[in-house]
Image (cartoon, rainbow, N blue to C red):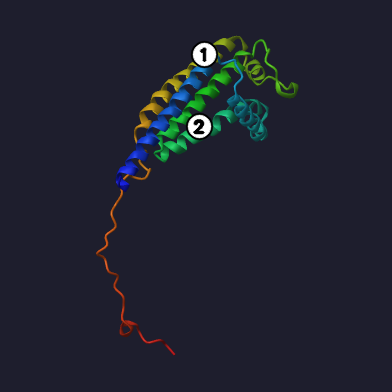
Amino acid sequence: MDIQEKLEELATQARWEKLLVAVIIAIYGLMCAFSPGTWRWLDGVNLLFHEAGHFFFTPFGRFMHFLGGTIGQLFFPVVCVIYFYLKKHYFSAFVVLFWVAQNMFNISVYAGDAAVTNLPILEGGIHDWNWMLTRLNMIRYTKLISGMIYLTGFVTLLVSIPGMVYFSFRDDEHEAEWEYVEPYVGYTPNIMDDDDFPPASR
C-alpha cells in the first residue's frame, strides 16, 4: 500500500468515526428532548456557566443579574458554534449546536417551574425565572414561555443531527487534503562559488 492509499484509508476511517460521534450525540440529544427534567452530566457543565453568567452580569443591574444565568449557559456554546462556522469546521459547529439545544431543554424546565418553584435552588437562592416573570407581570404565561423555549431547543436539535451526519462525510474546507505529493528530486540548489560572494568589508 502506497502513501496515497494509506492517507485515503485514514480519511475514510475519520469519516466513520465522526459518524459514530454524531449517532451517539443524536441518541443523547433525543434522550434529553424526551426527558428534559432528568438531570444529566452535561447539566453540571451548564450550571457552571449559569452561575458564571450571574457573576458577570451583576454590575448591569438586578434584572440582568437574574437573566445573566440563562445568558451565561447559552453564551459559550453559541460563541463556539459561530467560531467553528466561521472557520468552516461545519461538523464541529453542528456538534456544538446540539449543546445549544440541550441547554434550551434545561432552561425550559427551569422556566416552567417559575409558577410553582418546586426545583431545588443552589444554596437556597432566588428562583431566576420566578423573579423575572413576576417583575414582568408574566408569571401566568409560565407554561407558554417554557413551551416556546423547549420548541426552540427541539428545532435546534433537529437541525444539528442531520448537520452532523451530513458533514461526517465531507471534509471541512480547512482540513488538510488527503493527497500525497511526490517530492521533485530533479531540483539542484544553486550553490554560489567563492568568487560569487562579495568581498568582506574591512
Seen from this angle, which residue lies furthest right? Answer: 124
* Apparent side of residue 170 relative to residue 67 in the rendered image (left or right): left
Q: Nearer the viewer, residue 61 or 10?
A: 10
* Above-or-below relation of 114 to 99: above
Query: Number of labelled discs?
Result: 2
Nearest to N terminus: mark 2 or mark 1: 1
Residue 145 is left or right of residue 95, and the answer is right
Q: Is residue 171 above or below residue 144?
A: below
Residue 176 is situated, as x and y percent measured from the top left of the image, at 36, 45
Circle 1: residue type: Phe
Q: Are marks 2 and 1 in contact (CB under 8 Å)?
A: no
Question: Picture quarter containing residue 85?
Answer: top left
Compared with 129, 59 (above or below) is below
Q: Amino acid at mark 2?
A: Val
Cα gap from disc 2 to disc 1, whole angstroms: 23 Å
Element type at mark 1: helix
Q: Which residue is mark 1?
A: 34
Q: Which residue is mark 2?
A: 78
Q: Quadrant of the N terminus?
A: top left
Which residue is found at the position 31% from the left and 75% from the top?
191
Within 10 Å of the Cα at label 1, are there few (<14), some (14-19), or many (20+) other Cα atoms?
A: few
Q: Secondary structure at mark 2?
A: helix
Q: Position of residue 44 (x, y in %)?
A: 63, 27
Instruction: Name the spot of residue 4 as percent of width and height, x first.
Output: 30, 46
User: Nearer the viewer's eye, disc 2 or disc 1?
Assistant: 1
Tell me: 106 left or right of 164. right
In the image, what residue occupies the spot 67% across and 33% down? Answer: 55
**Which of the pair 194/148 is nearer the observer?**
194
The residue sitting at the bottom extreme is: 202
- Which quarter of the figure has residue 8? top left
